[in-house]
Amino acid sequence: MNIPERMKHFNVPSVSYTRFYGLNVFVNEQFGVLEKGADRAADDNAIFHACSISKMITALCVLKLAQDGHLDLYKDVNEYLTEWKIADNEFVAEKKVTLANLLAHQAGFCDYDGSFSPYKKGDAVPKTIDILRGVTPYNPEEVRAKYVPETDCEYSDAGYCVISQVLQDVFGEDVPKIAKRLIFEPLGLQRTFFWEIGKEPPEGINLEDCAAGHDNDGEVVDEIRAQYPNIEGAGLWATPHEMAKIAVDLLKSYHGNGGIVLNQEMAKLMLTPYGCVNDIGLGVFLDKDKNGEPYFFSQGWGIGMQCKLRVYYDKQQGVVVMTNSEPGMEQDVALVGEIIESVFE
């Protein structure tokens, strides 16, 4: 595959990807520049916005806390929530909202049209509890169940906001702190973090190493590096190599081969179909390729960025592709998908 040629076709200024084989062989490649008109070329240190891959990391945090006995995945989350609770109605009367069905997007929530747009500079920084109450422009109605949990699957950022509020109420910590303590530091990750609104990148991270976002014409977006009000669902920044290390650790746990974050039982639970559908686990999506080989994946698509992670269970290999472009089309038919297919064809 001629990646520079395909980058021109899709107007993508920069691509960085990591392939891994057998849980210990990593191959990294980068192309292009992190911002059109600037001299900063992509390299191993380049950091990209992972967008909704954030949810996979939030899920790992929840599963680790459950594994250690601090949370129950199947308990009514209203028993954890203190400042705000899910309102009673005919849907939750039949089945309660739990951390498990929240992680699997089956908790009964349907996001309001146009909600969870990028943060606008000058706005008050929204608190999770205000998003849940529906008093911010980022989610203008209170979060409530609209169908019986585990009878349908509706992708929901609001559901992950509920998870975030549970963590804050139970532990007094937000997702960025919990993820750093439970995942990033134990795995030795130096360039993976949740970027909080209104703050500079963490110590040791240079702003010029963080890719600027671009539209489908290859022009820098107005937001440059967009941030979202729901940090637990869309606030992650990382290099492909470090995202691959997280995936490899999960695979090691799944195969009972010494993973650090989860034990084998919890890793298998995460990567097993949950609830009323067969293509979603706890915080990840599940699929098979054209040859019937099973894999899990997570993907992100936001203002100026697109990325995807695909990992094969049995072959114990995978790829993470990250770009600083919003191509106006889904990952599988954009450059991200072309690279993934070329790796595994």
Image: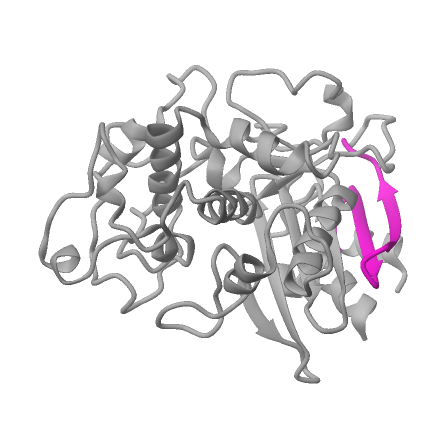
Q: Could you tell me which residue is drawn at 63 percent across and 28 percent down? A: 224
* Residue drawn 68% across the image and 82% down it: 290
In the image, is residue 306 part of the stretch drawn in magenta?
no
Q: Position of residue 213 (x, y in %)?
A: 66, 35
Quarter placement of the N terminus: bottom right
Classified by dominant secondary structure, the portion drawn in magenta counts as strand
Location of the C terminus by quadrant is bottom right
Q: Which color mode does the image show?
A: one colour
Relative depth, front residue between 262 and 309: 262
Examine the rendered structure and indicate whether residue 313 appears above or below residue 173. Answer: below
Depth check, front residue: 1 or 179: 179
* Residue in front for this viewpoint, 111 or 21: 21
Q: Is residue 34 magenta?
A: yes
Q: Is residue 26 above or below residue 39?
A: below
Q: Is residue 324 left or right of residue 38?
A: left
Expressed as whole percent of the image width and height from the top left, the position of residue 275 reads 36, 69
Q: Say whether residue 213 is visible.
A: no
Q: Residue at x 20, y 56 (%)?
A: 146
Range covered by the magenta-colored residues = 10-35
Residue occupying image coordinates x 69% and y 52%: 259
Confirm whether residue 105 shows in the render.
yes
* Residue 84 x %, y %: 21, 32
Residue at the bottom extreme of this rendering: 291
> Is 30 rendered above or below residue 126?
below
Q: Quadrant of residue 195?
A: top right
Q: Quadrant of residue 38?
A: top right
Residue 247 falls left or right of residue 79 = right
> Is 195 left, or right, of 105 in this rendering?
right
| Viewer-side residue, 208 vs 96 | 96
Q: Is residue 56 left or right of residue 47?
A: left
